[in-house]
Amino acid sequence: MSGVILRRPARRHTLISVVSMIDVMMILLFFFMVTSSYLNLDMVPALQKSDEAPDDTPVPSPSTKPGSPATLLIRIGADGAASVRGQPLANDALIALLRARLATDPLTPVVLFPSGGAQLQALITVMDTVTKAGAVRVKVIRLGAAK
């Protein structure tokens, strides 16, 4: 009696096409480029300090448009203290300053610059203080990495 020999077809190696993945990546890249907001650091007037201007008045930068609200820069140090124009402020003084600014222009932009060594809790505390004062346009920009 002769044995039956079954021959199975050889397995095909399926190729994964990366063309559709490239298309998806291009769509995502385009989406994020269009929807992201860019920040020109020259627009922050507190970075340019003038000797003639008092500490509580903003110094307009060259890129500030007439009629646009002056940006309030709040720096958060490594010790967690908030400072405006180099002057450290307690939470109550910061709330008073913000309320005074927001009384004249409710859409005043507030930019928070935590230092590289600032703790996350200090940033959260300042953000709570800023929102408690009534600010609605708040940005956080981290320039230095923690060491």
Image (cartoon, rainbow, N blue to C red):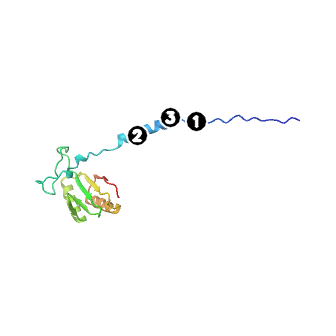
Which is more toward the observer, 39 or 35?
A: 39
Q: Position of residue 103 (x, y in %)?
A: 19, 56
Front residue (pair 81, 65): 81
Name the amino acid type tagged 2.
Answer: Leu
Question: What separation in Å lies between label 3 and label 2 (alpha carbons)?
Answer: 15 Å
Relative to 99, does residue 10 appear above or below in the rendering? above
Tag count in the figure?
3
Front one among 60 and 12 = 12
What's the residue at 69%, 35% (across, down)?
10
Residue under numbered circle 2: 29
For the residue pair 96 and 12, the one nearer the viewer reads as 12
145 left or right, relative to 88? right
- Residue 19, disc: 3
Residue neighbourhood size for the residue with mark 3, other residues' Cα within 10 Å, grouped as few (<14), some (14–19), many (≥20): few
Residue at the limit of the structure toward the front, as seen here: 147
Disc 1 crowd rating (10 Å Cα; few below 14, some 14-19, many 20+) is few
Instruction: Give the amino acid at mark 3.
Output: Val
Name which residue lies at 64% across and 35% down: 12
Q: Residue at x 42, y 40 (%)?
A: 28
Compared across the picture, whether 39 is left or right of 104 comes to right
Contact flag, marks 3 and 2 (Cβ < 8 Å) = no
Label 1: which secondary element = loop
Q: Where does the image place residue 138, in percent across and percent down from the top left?
A: 29, 53
**Mark 3 vs mark 2: which is more N-terminal?**
3
Instruction: Tell me whether the residue at label 1 lies in contact with that at label 3, contact meaning CB atoms closer than 8 angstroms.
Output: no
Amino acid on which disc 1 is placed: Leu
Question: To which quarter of the image does residue 134 belong?
Answer: bottom left
Give how far apart the Cα atoms at labels 1 and 2 are: 25 Å
Of pointers 1 and 2, the one earlier in the residue sequence? 1
Residue underneath mark 1: 15
**Residue 41, above or below 132:** above
* The label number, if any, that marks residue 147 in the structure image: none
